[in-house]
Amino acid sequence: MLNGKHIILGISGGIAAYKSVALLRLLVKAGAEVQVIITPSGKEFITPVTLSALSGKPVISEFFTANTGSWNSHVDLGLWADAMIIAPATASTIAKMAHGIADNMLITTYLSAKAPVFVAPSMDLDMFAHHTTTNNIALLKSYGNFIIEPAEGELASHLIGKGRMEEPENIVAYLDTYFRSSQDLKGKRVLITAGPTYEKIDPVRFIGNYSSGKMGYSLAHECAARGAKVTLISGPVSLKVEDTDGIEVIKIESGREMLSECEARFGKMDIAIMCAAVADYYVADVADKKIKRESEEIPELKLAKNKDIAATLGQVKTDKQILIGFALETDNEEENALKKLKKKNLDFIVLNSLKDKNSGFGTDNNTITIINKDCSKIKYPNMPKPAVSKAIVDIIVNNYLCSE
Ligand code: PMT
């Protein structure tokens, strides 16, 4: 599974850096293209010459290459990678990752990386057990990073305990398993709606809402990364999808445009996730010229009801298709979400809690409860939207696709 994969191997300054040489050799042997990034203190433990000889690429450590003055772009590296593995990850590097202290090339690249990040901690047993480290590791997990637990054994201090970086063979096996299982949506076609809709009032004004598209775009990336062919029907948002992401994006503006794009495609889809915040009403009598303020008369908007896209797809859904909706409620959250699930013939509904400040519209995080048809519920803590997407896709794969 590692053949042809682009892997960033990040090395920070710990005694286990010597094991990174073996890890690099194994990755290259498995057919991966590896770019090593080493922190300044990492170089105290292992020389860049050894690493570049094995990877066949210059090792990156500084923001600028001293002899040419050229800039090492962490953004380009972040886009290039299929995976980033930080081994060894010292307590200091873990803390910097958890809190965004971007003072070296490794951390800036980590912050730009779109690919999954694997962290193999290595430190003395007391440092590993310290609350600071456990909290930082918990933060990294909550951001969707994968922690490759250190093993127990004799440490550099000659003490015995947990803190030894996992063996290179096991790290490679971990990555291999990840790439194997991460293709669990391979061959599936997924339709996702995202963002708000804009309903025109006149040529310069519209009725809209605060949806930023973050949740829907994150779902699109998660599904694409797991091998699905994704079509994203997006309302007006500032987010972008890279060509390399393998996601087809169809930009629309109004609820009626979103409906017609969804209806045209749904028949060919295996899964549809209705994440957009579609306006309930559109303006029936759109003015063809800007409505002027000078007029004494206060304009009245004649509204008409937008057709419910999720319910429309729910009516034609086959037993083989999976239809998922979101619910945004301000009161009687679970009861209303369940009503929507039944009315729209959804397989499950994702309820966003607006009671939590860092949840719902425009936020980076979301607090969700997944409600199934049989009324069973799974509540999740407040998590970054990529982690929420992973949780939703895990439910699709484990509870719905496996019963096909
Ligand atoms: O974009 P972000 O800033 O990241 O915010 C994400 C989000 C809060 C917008 C998203 O997580 C979310 O909750 N989307 C659904 C919002 C909504 O419209 O909820 P609703 O309870 O009004 O609608 C229920 C379901 O019916 C939703 O799946 C919705 O997409 C769908 N619907 C609603 C109206 C309509 N005309 N057609 C629909 O398909």
Image (spheres, rainbow, N blue to C red):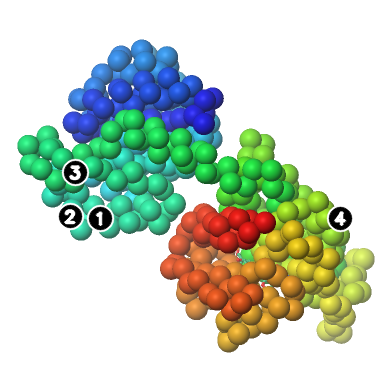
Q: Which mark is residue 134?
A: 1
User: Who's the residue at 46% across and 39% down the image?
Assistant: 177
Up/down of 359 relative to 36, above or below: below
| Distance between the alpha carbons at the discs numbered 4 and 2 | 56 Å
- Number of residues whose C-alpha sits closer than 10 Å to that of mark 3, classed few (under 14), some (14–19) or many (20 or more): some
| Distance between the alpha carbons at the discs numbered 2 and 3 | 16 Å
Q: Amino acid at mark 2?
A: His
| Distance between the alpha carbons at the discs numbered 2 and 1 | 6 Å
Report the residue marked by disc 4.
Answer: 264
- Whether residues under marks 2 and 3 lie with C-beta atoms below 8 angstroms apart, the answer is no
* Quadrant in the rendering for residue 393: bottom right
Report the residue marked by disc 2.
Answer: 130
- Whether residues under marks 4 and 3 lie with C-beta atoms below 8 angstroms apart, the answer is no
Up/down of 212 relative to 178, above or below: below
- Whether residues under marks 2 and 1 lie with C-beta atoms below 8 angstroms apart, the answer is yes
Q: Which mark is residue 152?
A: 3
Q: Amino acid at mark 4?
A: Ala
Secondary structure beneath dot 4 equals: helix
Is residue 112 visible to the viewer in this orientation of the structure? Answer: no
Question: Along the horizontal axis of the image, is 111 left or right of 122?
Answer: right
Looking at the rendered image, the disc whose residue lies closer to the viewer, 3 or 1, is: 3
Looking at the rendered image, the disc whose residue lies closer to the viewer, 4 or 3, is: 3
Q: Nearer the viewer, residue 102 or 220?
A: 220
Question: Quick one: label 4 or label 3, which is nearer the N terminus?
Answer: 3
- Number of residues whose C-alpha sits closer than 10 Å to that of mark 4, classed few (under 14), some (14–19) or many (20 or more): few
Q: Amino acid at mark 1?
A: Thr
Q: Position of residue 99 (x, y in %)?
A: 33, 51
Question: Quick one: label 2 or label 3, which is nearer the N terminus?
Answer: 2
Q: Position of residue 285 (x, y in %)?
A: 91, 74
